[in-house]
């Protein structure tokens, strides 16, 4: 249901959905909310990140993408490497998906827009 709210034309609805999504992904019940970080959810976060006019929505969309990477890596059993840091293949499928969606360019553009608005 929270993912459905991301397609709303009301910025406040999108913001509340992203707050809920982030809370669910960062809370103790994150395993029961795996749909929030599956590959089908990533384009929705990227769409919101690219199209929202609200800085707080952009921030929460970026937070959701970051948490998706963390949870995807943990779900694959790659939470840490032998050296204690992140493994080299940490979340590589999601990273590839994000790259194919053009996330790097979108983030760079949004950062410039937000910075020029401050």
Image (cartoon, helix red, strand yellow):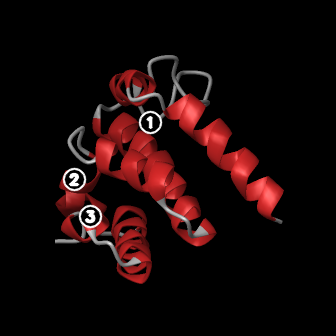
* The furthest residue to the top: 88
Q: Nearer the viewer, mark 3 or mark 1?
A: 3
Q: Quadrant of residue 29?
A: bottom left
Q: Position of residue 32 (x, y in %)?
A: 18, 62
Secondary element under disc 3, as helix, strand or loop, is helix
Secondary element under disc 1, as helix, strand or loop, is loop
Q: Earlier in the sequence, mark 3 or mark 1?
A: 3
Contact check, label 3 and label 1, Cβ < 8 Å: no
Q: Quadrant of residue 77?
A: top left
**Label 2 to label 1: alpha-carbon separation:** 16 Å
Q: Nearer the viewer, mark 3 or mark 2?
A: 3
Query: Which corner quadrant holds the N terminus?
Result: bottom left
Label 2 neighbourhood size at 10 Å, few (<14), some (14-19), many (20+)? some
Residue at the spot of label 3: 7
**Label 3 to label 1: alpha-carbon separation:** 32 Å
Is the residue 37 above or below the residue 95 in the image? below
Q: Quadrant of residue 9?
A: bottom left
Residue at the spot of label 2: 34
| Label disc, if present, on residue 63 of the rendered structure | none
Q: From the viewer's perspective, tell me whether residue 54 is left or right of residue 47.
A: right
Label 1 neighbourhood size at 10 Å, few (<14), some (14-19), many (20+)? some
Q: Position of residue 8 (x, y in %)?
A: 28, 71
Q: Residue at x 55, y 65 (%)?
A: 53
Residue at the spot of label 1: 79
């Amino acid at each position: 249901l929270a993912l459905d709210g991301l397609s709303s034309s009301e910025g406040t609805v999108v913001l509340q959905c992203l707050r809920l999504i982030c809370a669910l992904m960062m809370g103790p019940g994150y395993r029961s909310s795996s749909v929030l970080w599956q590959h089908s959810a990533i384009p929705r976060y990227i769409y919101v990140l690219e199209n929202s006019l609200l800085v707080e929505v952009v921030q929460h969309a970026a937070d959701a993408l970051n948490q998706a990477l963390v949870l995807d890596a943990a779900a694959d059993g790659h939470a840490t490497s032998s050296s204690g840091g992140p493994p080299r293949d940490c979340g590589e499928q999601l990273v590839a998906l994000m790259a194919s969606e053009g996330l790097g360019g979108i983030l760079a553009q949004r950062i410039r827009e937000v910075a020029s608005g401050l």
